[in-house]
Every structure is written in C-alpha cells, then in structure tokens.
Amino acid sequence: MLNLRTSVNDKSQDRGDSEAWMRICRRLRADVGEDVFSSWFGRLELDSLSDGTAALSVPTKFLKSWIQSHYAEKLLAALTSEFPMVKRLVVTIRSSNRPPLGAPARADIEDEESGSNLSQGARKTPTQDAAASGARGFAAQRPYEPQTAKTRAEGEADIIAGSPLDGRLTFSTFAAGRSNQLALAAAQRVAAATPEERLPYNPLYLHASVGLGKTHLLQAVAHMAQTMSRRVIYLTAERFMYGFVSALKAQTAIAFKEKLRGIDILVIDDIQFLQGKSIQQEFCHTLNALIDAHRQIVIAADRPPSELESLDERVRSRLAGGLCVEIGGLDEQLRVRILEGRIAAAKHAHPNFEVPSAVTAFVAHAIQTNGRDLDGAVNRLLAHASLNGAPLEVETAELAIRDLVRAHDPKRIKIEDIQKLVATHFNVSRADILSSRRTANVVRPRQIAMYLSKALTLRSLPEIGRRFGGRDHTTVLHAVRKIDGLAAKDGALSEEIELLKRMLME
Ligand SMILES: Nc1ncnc2c1ncn2[C@@H]1O[C@H](COP(=O)(O)OP(=O)(O)OP(=O)(O)O)[C@@H](O)[C@H]1O
C-alpha cells in the first residue's frame, strides 16, 4: 500500500510519488488543455493509493461530481500510466484548508509547469475547516461508476438555469447584528430595487470568512428578486465555469452569453474559485455588459477583491468598483439570535424540542466560530433531546456539543492549569485550593480560580465544583459572583485577574 498521507516522513518515497503525481498532472493538462485543467484539476489532490484504489480529493461537492462524470476515465488512464496497480478511483470532498499531504504543493506544480496559478489560497482556519467539513460532509464514497448520458444531459440543462436556491435562506431567516447590518441593508436594497433605479452598488461585493452568512444573503437576494418577478440567476463561480465550458463544447456559447446578459440580477457566489484565463475573460465581459446595461451584480467571496490573487487584474478592479462590504464575526448576541431562529425552525418539525434559554446562552458562548457550527450544535441538541427523551439542560448540552467545541477550541485551558497558576501566584499550594481550609489567604485564591475556570473553560458549574475537591455548584456560583462584584469595585483586583487570564491564554 502506498499511502501518501503517511509517507511524508519517507522523503524518497514521498518525492517519488510527488513526481509521479506531477507527471500525471502534466499528462492531464496536455490532454484536456490549460483552461479545462486549471478549472477542474487545479485543486485535485492525490491522497492515497491502496488495494488498487486511488483516493483523490477536491474541496467541493460540485468539483467532485464534475470530475467523476466527465473526467474519471481520463483521470484513471493518467493514474494507471504511473501507478499500474490502480484499478479504481474514489474522489472525496476534503476540507478546504487541509494541508496538502503527499501530493505536491501547488507551488511546485506551478514552478514545474510555469503555468497559471493552480492554487486557491484557502484562507480558512482549522476551526472553520472542521465546520465546513461537517456541513459538507459526504456519505460513504463509492468508486467511480460511469454515468449514463441521460443523467449528464439533465445535469447540464440544470446548470444553465443557475444553481438551486435553498428555500430556507431568505431575509426573514437572516439574523441581523452589528457585524452584518451593512451587508444586510445593501443586499436588501439591491434586491428590492426597481429596474429603473441606478444604485451606486454595482457590483455589490460581500466578503467574509467561512460560515458568516454570505451564501445566505446572496440566496436571499435571489429569492426576493424572484418574488418581484425580476430575472435573476444565482450561480457559484464553479457553476459559471461549468456552464461556460459546457456551452463552448456544445457550441452554444453565444446562447449562454446572451442568456446571462439578458437578466436583471446576476448573483455569483464563491468568486475566489473562478479559474482559467478564458473563463475569467468571459466573466469580465459579462460583468462589463451587465454593468453597462445597469443590471445588478452581486458577488460573494472569502476575501476582498484585492486579495483574489488568482484572478486577472481587470476582473479584480471591476469587482472592486462598486460597493464592497465585509461581514464580520458573529458576536455573542448575534449567535443567540441565530440559534433562536434555528431552534424555532426545528420546532416546526419537532414540536417537543424545547431548548431552555440557559442552554441557548451556553451554546452561544461555547460556539464562537460561525453559523455553520451553530447549525451543527442545534442538530446535536435535537439528536440528543430526541434520543434521551429528557429535557435539555446545560450539562447535557455540554455533552452534546463537546466534539464541536473541541474541534474549534484553539487553546484548551485546563482547570488544573488554572489551579496551579493561581496557587503559584498567591503563594499557596494547589492542595490548599482543593482542600476544605477556609482561611482568608486560601479562600480568595480558590474563588479566583473558580471564577477563571468559569470564564475560560466550558465546564459547567457542577463540573467545576467537582474539580475543586467535590464542592457543590452553588459554591462555585457564589465564588463567581463574589469575584465579579469585587473586581467591579477594585481596579487592582480586576487588573490582577486580567493578568492571570492573559498568562493562561498565552
Ligand atoms: N446572520 C445569520 N442569520 C441566520 N443564519 C446565519 C447567519 N449567518 C450565518 N448563518 C447560517 O450559517 C450557515 C452558514 O452560512 P453561509 O453558508 O451563508 O456562510 P458563507 O459565508 O457562505 O460560508 P462559506 O464561505 O463557507 O460558503 C448557514 O446555515 C446560514 O444560514
């Protein structure tokens, strides 16, 4: 078995596999042409080879199905030219920021080929990554099976009509907060504009990191525009590429361009994935034609236009020429609102699903990343509630979302570390802190350690109590309130606590 993932320490093996993979890429590129290669194979990675199966991965579901349905045979042929034992291939969807494994780094391919930039600067953090993989998780992968001509034709007809809209992603289900109110207002304004209005928001360009509501807002624009009988097309950049390449192949490129230019609102998601020189050129022409005709364009990406390194300079400046709005992170209040919306929606299908406000507040405090993780948390609560049949409490919620929190907690602070640091700081022993001694020189450090445990970990009050020598949760609550009150009045104590927090978080 050749496992590229685990062969990273075996330099010679690794290099051999990487070079073979580069030759496969070169062969494919020569076979399908530069544009097609960079559109569909630029983000393909070879993960492992075992038992005659080559496991490859791409960052999106769309790329996976496109490669499987259109290029599986070519890909298999290219793979067997280097690895004759390969009989099957499996394409999976990987998280967008997973570091390349045994496969060559994108820069290597670029150097070798002196071709176009194949890399898609994935900017998602590991935290976000896990979120994306959770939401876009896929069922067990089946090795490639050739598609029938019929299913292919149906797929193509679909694409030209735009990407499907999700009926749940509307303005009414979008929770407003400080970080997204400008983006929301601009999106609503654009969606509600009459054809005669000349808004200075063209294109409207929204950017944010993963899971902060870009797609939600874009789909909400498309929904609302549709209800106002505007001609609107919502496409991901990949669907745009797919539509364009298919149209070129089928010699219907003119019809494709006309169709796009004849609409009122063009909504394009994930523009950072737009690849290929001629595709970008065509996209630029489409942008120009629509803007000149005062048709509205709405775009979303994971970064501002100036940072879309793989896009042609002309495209970037066109994109930056309208209104550019960043959607910031979700603050706790907004997270509560999003959760409440999700819980209310879940209750329609599961009327017995009750989430006490303390649980909602706990989840909003624990999950600080993005909307996708909040969705994941609500799903876990729902599963937990229906399996246990008992009402949800903070403690059960803590269990239910533990894996999500673990995946996203960059620095997990342990209660034990807090106890050790506080003991050293106040010149007492950790055993004193855990003991039942009630002298003032021990009581205050103990209360501070409990306070910090509540503030810096996701442990519930009973759990903290248990870890402080088996105390009751009311003792912990008393300590938290006491220190809160003292710190509010005593600047020196408040500074001391801040200092301890910083030391623990470093
Ligand atoms: N303000 C909000 N109100 C309600 N739901 C939200 C909000 N922000 C995000 N969400 C929800 O979070 C999830 C992820 O949001 P969305 O898919 O729009 O993120 P995105 O910014 O497009 O992320 P990506 O870059 O991964 O595509 C969705 O279910 C969305 O409905």
Image: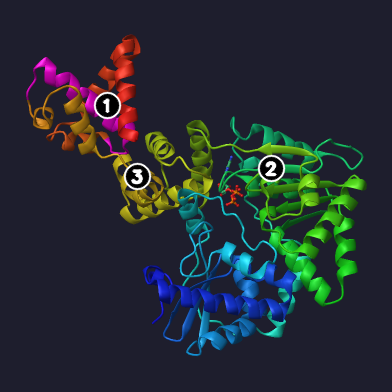
User: Label 1 belongs to which residue?
Assistant: 451
Crowd around label 2: few <14 · some 14–19 · many ≥20 (10 Å): many
Q: Residue at x 71, y 82 (%)?
A: 150
Q: Which one is in front, 184 or 381?
A: 184
Q: Closer to the N terminus: mark 1 or mark 2?
A: 2
Disc number for residue 397: 3
Q: Residue at x 41, y 36 (%)?
A: 365
Q: Residue lying furthest top in this view? A: 489
The stretch of residues the image draws in magenta is 437-460
Residue 127 x/y as whole percent: 45, 49
Report the Cα–Cα distance between label 3 and label 1.
21 Å
| Vertical comparison of 287 with 85: above or below | above
Crowd around label 1: few <14 · some 14–19 · many ≥20 (10 Å): many
Which coloring applies here?
A: rainbow
Disc number for residue 206: 2
Which element carries disc 2, helix, strand or loop? Answer: strand
Dots 1, 2 in contact, CB < 8 A = no
Q: Residue at x 73, y 36 (%)?
A: 186
Q: Quadrant of residue 159?
A: bottom right
Amino acid at the residue labelled 3? Ala
Residue 274 x/y as whole percent: 71, 59
Q: Quadrant of residue 156?
A: bottom right
Q: Using the rendered image of the protein, determine whether residue 161 is visible from the camera's viewpoint.
A: no
Locate the C terminus by quadrant.
top left
Q: Which one is in front, 134 or 50?
A: 50
Residue 461 x/y as whole percent: 25, 33
Q: Quadrant of residue 114?
A: bottom right
Locate the N terminus by quadrant.
bottom left
Amino acid at the residue labelled 1? Tyr
Report the Cα–Cα distance between label 1 and label 2.
40 Å
| Vertical comparison of 92 with 326: above or below | below
